[in-house]
Image (cartoon, rainbow, N blue to C red):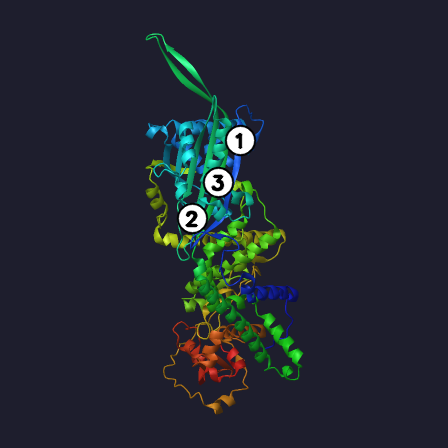
């Protein structure tokens, strides 16, 4: 048995080695311990509430009545933008017919713009529609109010289109449209829009209306706005001073809309968007006298024509999360996991060094030569197998990520926010996003652990056919693909309405309605929705690499005429050390799990000749029987794989068994159980035919799942504890 054979594809393996272990050992250094503060990104406005988008205040359109469609606006502003959800709700609710069908998602739009003349008619008719619902109001100064609820789509990112039927979130909003006729507008501007408790907008009760306090961006213009309602009053007073005289008058439609707060449990992540749309009209009026020829009476009717219309909007969103309060816990998990990982690699290198010490050529080597040969031995062990073979750090990282994941997706999604849905992302920014989001690799690894664990329940089947594990880098590739989850494109955008209804005008009921928990899928759905993106991307990534493997395999087979095939899952030949000396789930990554493999049938056939003899009559030998131990010290050991083959196994197979044990037994927990704790019982067995000695776990001999062992051809020489064996002898066990 030798470790000195040349390593195939040395430079490629060296590249994998450096990249894998760099990422493996620097997870905390690169990604931090967790989310400990938002102060450098978001502004805190509540104990656990932060403004994460905006707030923004901006004009959309200021159109005169003589404008033609030669000038246009981006269709986004009236079809896709979330500020139009409430507007389109009232268009549907009040049967406003002047909005083009394509803007209401009834048909496809011919292009990406809409003419200003069309926008003028759309806005003017919407104000008329709300005005038409007016009834007799108190002293004629109360605004006309229409309150509504809407259920709508919000599809904007790549992950939204992956299994939308199963994972689409249900979005609800409460809207309130308030029409101020010229008299009501002058009255409320004199007293203040929020002065009257019975007729004030919902926004008067919300904390976010103070833009000077809730601004996230360093925008002096936004800071100077003060509160939303004071800015509206300021703009309206200016318009009234300029136009509300002689035969001109000014009226206004204000639509404020707020998403329902729908938290996801564990870290209580919840998003809530808000916006206000003000549509202001300048109208030219004149009196028209109508005569009644029958009664010979005359009536004077005021006719008005809109000569200017302005669309001005305010929007933003907030997030509620207590993930910061979990920071100490998640940080502790990551520190423990990272420390374990460093110890894991140190134990592995030490194991390689002591395994090398058994070779005569190692004795005379210099210190630098010893390190070099130990490093070469470490290089022979697949890095991906080492990374995922230890369940404990994977569990620590997965638990920490399960708490941070919902908020992590929010932070990543913010990086893709663009004006009018345009695609814009810089390479450096994408690297930062990748570093943050690829921590879900530990969640994916935990899923693969569960799959391997289910498969390994049948020990006999697992040993006969091998332990199924994922191919190298399969988990990493799926995680890398998941970084595209929040990729944004105008083609993905859909904010169409699902249902809508008019509701009672009560600020209290609106507030209660917007705070309901578990509305969408109940408590379990609220808990797991925080991980819906990861679940979808795991499934999509698995399908993607499966299809890619199939396409590559077909191309290699039929175009390149290579006798190969591509696989996603591969089997690792399981020695008898598996499960009895180290966990079978440590093979979560297949030892020889390459994507492209030769299309040949590998494996072995088991011989079931003879009778299986129980070992209940065998008495345990004393673990202090050093005399008998010394007699068999220099005997050549054979792997149990040779027993299954019932023939001498070539040196490569024996080396694989030793390397597998070296990798798995240097896990700190496994090492403690075998070397520092009580240890496991190890049986020395001699073949009656050849006289060869075999080391097997004693539990494997008495296990009912190992009927393929030809025990009638073997005799037990000695039974000892694993902590009594030399390191190299223990590595040969199995």
Along the polypeptide, which appears first: circle 3 or circle 2? 2
| Residue 581, percent from left and from top | 46, 75
**Count of number-bearing discs:** 3
Residue 494 visible within the image: no
Residue at (39%, 15%) from the top-left corner?
300
Which picture quadrant has residue 721? bottom left
Residue 187 visible within the image: yes
As helix, strand or loop, the secondary structure at mark 3 comes to strand
Measured in 3D between alpha carbons, the distance from the residue under mark 2 to the one under mark 1, in whole angstroms, is 40 Å
Along the polypeptide, which appears first: circle 3 or circle 1? 1
| Residue 112, percent from left and from top | 55, 34
Please determine whether, in this image, residue 128 is positioned above or below residue 676. above
Nearest to viewer (mark 3 / mark 2): 3
As helix, strand or loop, the secondary structure at mark 1 comes to strand
Position of 412 with respect to 173 (left or right) is right
Measured in 3D between alpha carbons, the distance from the residue under mark 3 to the one under mark 1, in whole angstroms, is 15 Å
Are the residues tagged 2 and 1 within 8 Å (C-beta)? Answer: no
Residue at (45%, 65%) from the top-left corner?
328
Nearest to viewer (mark 2 / mark 1): 1
Q: Could you say which is closer to the camera, residue 156 or residue 322?
A: 322
> Which quadrant of the rendered structure holds the N terminus?
bottom right
Q: Which residue is mark 1?
A: 62
| Residue 396, percent from left and from top | 46, 66
User: Label 3 neighbourhood size at 10 Å, few (<14), some (14-19), many (20+)?
Assistant: many
User: Label 2 neighbourhood size at 10 Å, few (<14), some (14-19), many (20+)?
Assistant: some
Please determine whether, in this image, residue 662 is positioned above or below residue 439. below
Q: Which label belongs to residue 314?
A: 3
Position of 288 with respect to 343 (left or right) is left
Q: Could you say which is closer to the camera, residue 263 or residue 301?
A: 301
Q: Could you say which is closer to the camera, residue 318 or residue 634?
A: 318
Q: Which label belongs to residue 543?
A: none
Q: Which residue is mark 2?
A: 167
């Amino acid at each position: 048995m030798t470790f000195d054979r040349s390593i195939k594809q040395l430079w490629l393996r060296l590249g994998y080695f450096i990249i894998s272990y760099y990422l493996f050992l620097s997870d905390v250094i690169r990604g931090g311990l967790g989310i400990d503060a938002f102060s450098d990104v978001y502004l805190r406005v509540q104990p656990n509430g932060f403004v994460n988008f905006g707030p923004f205040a901006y004009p959309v359109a200021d159109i005169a009545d003589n404008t033609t469609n030669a000038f246009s606006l981006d269709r986004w502003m009236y079809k896709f933008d979330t500020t139009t959800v409430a507007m389109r709700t009232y268009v549907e609710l009040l049967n406003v017919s002047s909005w083009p069908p394509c803007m209401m998602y009834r048909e496809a739009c011919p292009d990406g713009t809409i003419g200003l003349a069309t926008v003028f008619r759309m806005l003017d008719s919407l104000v008329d529609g709300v005005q038409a619902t007016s009834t007799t109001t108190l002293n004629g100064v109360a605004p006309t109010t229409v309150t509504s609820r809407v259920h709508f789509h919000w599809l904007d990112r790549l992950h939204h289109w992956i299994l939308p039927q199963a994972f689409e979130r249900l979005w609800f909003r409460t809207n309130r449209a308030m029409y101020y006729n010229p008299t009501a507008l002058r009255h409320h501007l004199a007293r203040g829009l929020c002065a009257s408790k019975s007729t004030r907008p919902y926004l008067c009760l919300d904390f976010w209306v103070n833009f000077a306090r809730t601004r996230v961006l360093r925008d002096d213009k936004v800071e100077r706005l003060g509160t939303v309602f004071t800015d509206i009053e300021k703009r309206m007073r200016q318009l009234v001073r300029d136009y509300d005289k002689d035969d001109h008058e000014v009226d206004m439609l204000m639509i404020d809309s707020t998403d329902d707060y729908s938290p996801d449990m564990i870290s209580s992540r919840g998003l809530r968007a808000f916006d206000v749309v003000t549509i202001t009209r300048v109208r030219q009026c004149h009196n028209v006298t109508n005569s009644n020829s029958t009664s010979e009476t005359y009536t004077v009717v005021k006719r008005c024509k809109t000569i200017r219309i302005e669309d001005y909007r305010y929007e933003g969103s907030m997030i509620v999360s207590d993930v910061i309060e979990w920071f100490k816990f998640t940080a502790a998990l990551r520190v423990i996991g990272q420390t374990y990982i460093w110890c894991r690699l140190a134990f592995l290198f030490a194991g390689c060094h002591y395994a090398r010490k058994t070779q005569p050529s190692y004795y005379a080597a210099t210190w630098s030569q010893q390190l070099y040969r130990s490093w070469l031995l470490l290089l022979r062990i697949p890095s991906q197998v080492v990374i995922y073979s230890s369940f404990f750090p994977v569990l620590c990282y997965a638990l920490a990520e399960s708490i941070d994941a919902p908020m992590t997706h929010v932070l990543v999604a913010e990086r893709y926010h663009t004006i009018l849905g345009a695609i814009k992302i810089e390479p450096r920014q994408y690297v930062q996003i990748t570093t943050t989001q690829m921590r879900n690799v530990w969640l994916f690894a935990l899923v693969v652990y569960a799959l391997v664990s289910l498969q390994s329940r049948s020990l006999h089947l697992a040993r006969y056919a091998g332990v199924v594990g994922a191919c190298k880098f399969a988990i990493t590739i799926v995680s890398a693909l998941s970084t595209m989850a929040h990729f944004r494109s105008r083609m993905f955008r859909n904010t169409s309405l699902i249902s809508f209804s008019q509701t009672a005008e009560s600020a209290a009921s609106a507030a209660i309605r917007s705070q309901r928990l578990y509305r969408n899928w109940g408590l379990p759905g609220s808990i797991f929705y925080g991980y819906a993106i990861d679940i979808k991307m795991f499934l999509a990534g698995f399908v993607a690499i499966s299809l890619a493997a199939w396409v590559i395999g077909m191309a290699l087979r039929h175009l390149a005429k290579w006798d190969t095939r591509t696989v996603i899952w591969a089997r690792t030949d399981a020695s008898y050390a598996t499960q009895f000396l180290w966990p079978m789930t440590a093979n979560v990554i297949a030892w020889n799990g390459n994507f492209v493999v030769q299309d040949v049938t590998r494996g072995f056939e088991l011989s079931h000749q003879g009778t299986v003899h129980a070992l209940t009559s065998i008495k345990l030998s004393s673990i202090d029987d050093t005399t008998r131990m010394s007699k068999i010290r220099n005997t050549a050991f054979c792997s149990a794989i040779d027993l299954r083959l019932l023939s001498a196994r070539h040196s490569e197979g024996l080396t694989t068994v030793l390397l597998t044990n070296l990798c798995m037994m240097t896990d700190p927990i496994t090492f403690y159980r075998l070397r520092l704790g009580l240890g496991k019982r190890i049986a020395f067995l001699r073949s009656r035919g050849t006289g060869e000695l075999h080391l097997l776990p004693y539990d494997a001999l008495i296990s009912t799942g190992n009927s393929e062992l030809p025990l009638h051809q073997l005799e037990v020489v000695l039974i000892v504890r694993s902590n009594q064996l030399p390191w190299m002898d223990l590595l040969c066990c199995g």
